[in-house]
Image (cartoon, coloured by chain):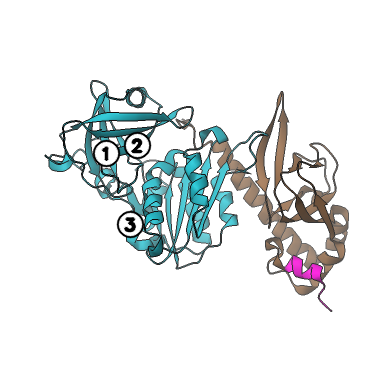
Amino acid sequence: MSSVTSDVMRPVRARVVSVVKETRDTFTLAVTPADGESWEAFQPGQFNMLYVFGVGELPISISGDPEERERLVYTVRSVGQATHALVSRRPGETIGVRGPFGAGWPLGAARGKDVLVVAGGIGLAPLRPLIYHVLRYRDDYVRLLVLYGARSPGDLLYRKQLAEWSRAPDTQVLVTVDYGGLSWRGHVGVVTTLLRHVRLHVGRTVAYICGPEVMMRYVIRLLEARGLAPTDIYLSMERNMKCGAGFCGHCQLGPYFVCKDGPVFSYQQMRPWLDRYEV
Amino acid sequence: MQATPLTEVLKEHPFLEGFKPEHIQKMAELALEVQFGRDQIIFREGQESGLFFLILSGRIALEVSAPGRILRVQTLGPGEELGWSSVLGEGGKHFQARSLETVRALAFEGSRLRQACDQDPSFGYALMRRLLKVVAERLQATRMQLLDVYAPRAAKLI
């Protein structure tokens, strides 16, 4: 048995186990090793390069439980040719998998503190492994606060799980949509408006943010205004990742390669690079 | 002056955080406790409603009518404010407000608030600063909504 990471540039064949439609354009895909190979354990926040043979390769964050070794789970939004090809795979078909790559969410930073998760749109997917971890090792953390925003009720991911998580002890889950119809009775408003409804203990809260970059900037501004230090704020960056190992330079952001040094960074690291139109 | 239960309620409301005791007392004199049942229309789009509300419990949706549908654009909850434009006293409501559940609130006549501001500029300044903060937050949220950050591809300006 060889490890998936024995050669970072060599994809390992993986068999598609299931493809579940989450929303109109987003699917959750589970794969298992096709040739008896073993998965390398992954850290919440890491990603794999997924190769649809003959179409292309994509960096996709792992959205499953980090302690589930038999399968790897990804939530993919179908927005282009390669993502469409990926979510169109049928159970039994194979894809290539490289990784896991990059730096994940630093879970140790929140040990003994409140965990604040702020996610927008498909940004909940890279944060789900972190939520699984916190819920499994509940005694290591104090409160778990999950703030999640999406465009409309139909765009919300993992709706059943959000409801389950909200029933866990010392856990608060608030969900909002930018626009709602009459049948939606939950919050309406951008994700930043949810911050008004949570009590933050400065110095005892670590924030983990993932979503569109503009959303993350607004969230960070409000967190800083509430007194959170840049070293207590972590975010996942998205750039044009190709090799996954810091060789090609496609994802360079200032002094960092997002694929290798990230995708998760502290705000302390990212502060000089976030507001720039181009670097 | 002896604190009344209403002044205690007002002191706890985030909108009035840091308000001077005499200003809290002034607000208490102008406040009227109100309750709305679930799915009640509090005011309609275009209506000349002169009331400003501080929400104590329950949630309210702001809605706008479009041909063939009603779009819910914002929800407000405990600790938030509704009807800030009433304090300006200009024009009708821009949105329809509907209670999503039983709502308890304190209502203030916009005209009486304006009168109190005119009589006591220190009170007026404190109130207007807070209203301006609410308006700024709503403006910022609206800008973010307009950006449609969850769209598959962000439109490029150039």
What residue type is disc 3 on? Pro
Left or right of A265, for residue A166: right
* Label 2 close to label 1 by CB (< 8 Å): yes
Do the residues marked 1 and 3 share a common chain?
A: yes
Vertical placement of residue A152 versus A235, above or below: above
Report crowding for label 1: few under 14, some 14 to 19, many 20 or more residues within 10 A (C-alpha): many
Kindly identify the residue that appears in the image at 70 percent across and 67 percent down.
B12
Q: Which residues are magenta?
A: B1-11
Helix, strand or loop for disc 3: loop
Q: Main secondary structure of the magenta part?
A: helix
Q: Which residue is mark 2?
A: A74
Do the residues marked 3 and 2 share a common chain?
A: yes
Which one is earlier in the sequence, the residue at label 2 or at label 1? 1
* A32 magenta-colored: no
Which one is earlier in the sequence, the residue at label 3 or at label 2? 2
Q: Which residue is mark 3?
A: A106
What residue type is disc 2 on? Tyr
Chain of the residue under label 3: A
Kindly indicate which chain is depicted in cyan in the rendered structure.
Answer: A
